[in-house]
């Protein structure tokens, strides 16, 4: 028994752009950076959507500073012109339904860089995540978001927050000719010449008479080509038939 293959699921391709703008609530004086990791779709029961290794980007290092104007704002680090792009393919959970997609994750990792200039590995301050599938309906619009940073092993009331922007632009698939698919060849209709033009209603009697003339000509040609017996032979045959008939009487 052969199992039928799974039907193809609808998919839509987007180009995602994430901009990292601001980090609030981190320790003042620390030098921090944010990593953007394109993790991709989660593993599902179908087994066809497996998480693959994705690209990652990292912002430049910035110092967490306290607001100099004394407006009571939390210490923050700010970035300008820090944007990263990646192509994202969202797969529909049901065939023919494009509104509900499987999750597609982007994670953000905030790291603290040592200030003493040593080459020690940066320590992770906390992480945040974002599901791009939830924002496919708002494509073509830039969205501003504030993501809470979950600290590693620390339970605090006021979590640091990461301010980002998200922009999704759908990429339309271009139809390409399939060279391996054979299609039936349909001959194009030939334009009728002046002699083969279809007759109109007015010309129908003349066309009928012309057809009769052609039939009569063909009959004459056939009759002319049929073999004929000589006149003398015909007379001899008739004389023989007469003699035989008289003998029988």
Image (cartoon, rainbow, N blue to C red):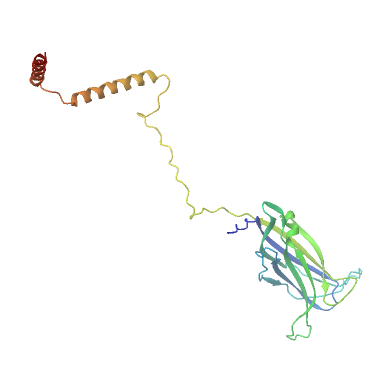
Q: Is residue 203 visible?
A: no
Q: Quadrant of residue 83?
A: bottom right
Q: Nearer the viewer, residue 178 or 137?
A: 178
Q: Is residue 111 visible?
A: yes
> Residue at image x 65%, y 56%?
11
Asked where in the image residue 140 lies, by quadrant, the reply is bottom right
**Relative vertical location of residue 106 with respect to residue 120 in this rendering, above or below:** above
Q: Is residue 236 left or right of residue 178?
A: left
Please state the horizontal and vertical placement of residue 201, each as a whole percent of the image: 43, 20
Q: Position of residue 32 (x, y in %)?
A: 78, 76
- Would you place residue 191 above or below residue 230 in this image? below
| Image quarter in which the N terminus is found | bottom right
> So how many labels did they put on this image?
0
- Give whichever of 183, 163 is nearer the camera: 183
Residue 54 is left or right of residue 71, and the answer is left
* Quarter of the rendering containing residue 191: top left
Nearest the viewer among 229 and 16 is 229
Question: Residue 6: x percent and y percent?
Answer: 62, 58
Q: Is residue 142 left or right of residue 175?
A: right
Q: Is residue 221 left or right of residue 101?
A: left
Q: Nearer the viewer, residue 42 or 55?
A: 42
The residue depicted at 79 percent of the width and 60 percent of the height is 144
Q: Is residue 136 above or below residue 127?
A: above
Residue 119 point in image, percent of width and height: 73, 85
Name the outermost residue toward the front: 249
- Work out which quarter of the rendered image holds the C terminus and state it: top left
């Amino acid at each position: 028994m052969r199992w039928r293959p799974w039907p193809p699921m609808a998919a839509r391709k987007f180009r995602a752009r994430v901009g990292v703008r601001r980090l609030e609530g981190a320790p003042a004086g620390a030098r921090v950076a944010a990593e953007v990791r394109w993790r991709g779709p989660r593993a599902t029961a179908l087994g066809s959507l497996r998480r693959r290794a994705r690209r990652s980007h990292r912002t430049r290092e910035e110092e967490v500073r306290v607001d100099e104007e004394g407006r009571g704002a939390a210490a923050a680090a700010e970035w300008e012109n820090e944007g990263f792009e990646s192509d994202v393919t969202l797969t529909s959970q049901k065939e023919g339904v494009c509104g509900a997609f499987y999750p597609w994750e982007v994670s953000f990792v905030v790291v603290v860089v040592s200030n003493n200039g040593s080459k020690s590995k940066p320590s992770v301050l906390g992480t945040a995540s974002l599901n791009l599938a939830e924002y496919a309906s708002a494509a073509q619009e830039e969205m501003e978001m504030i993501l809470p940073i979950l600290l590693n092993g620390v339970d605090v009331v006021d979590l640091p927050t990461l301010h980002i922007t998200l922009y999704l632009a759908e990429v339309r698939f271009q139809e390409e000719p399939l060279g391996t698919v054979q299609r039936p060849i349909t001959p194009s209709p030939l334009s009728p010449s002046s002699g083969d033009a279809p007759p109109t209603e007015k010309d129908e009697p003349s066309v009928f008479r012309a057809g009769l003339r052609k039939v009569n000509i063909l009959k004459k040609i056939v009759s002319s080509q049929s073999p004929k017996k000589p006149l003398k032979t015909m007379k001899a045959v008739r004389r023989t038939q007469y003699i035989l008939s008289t003998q029988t009487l």
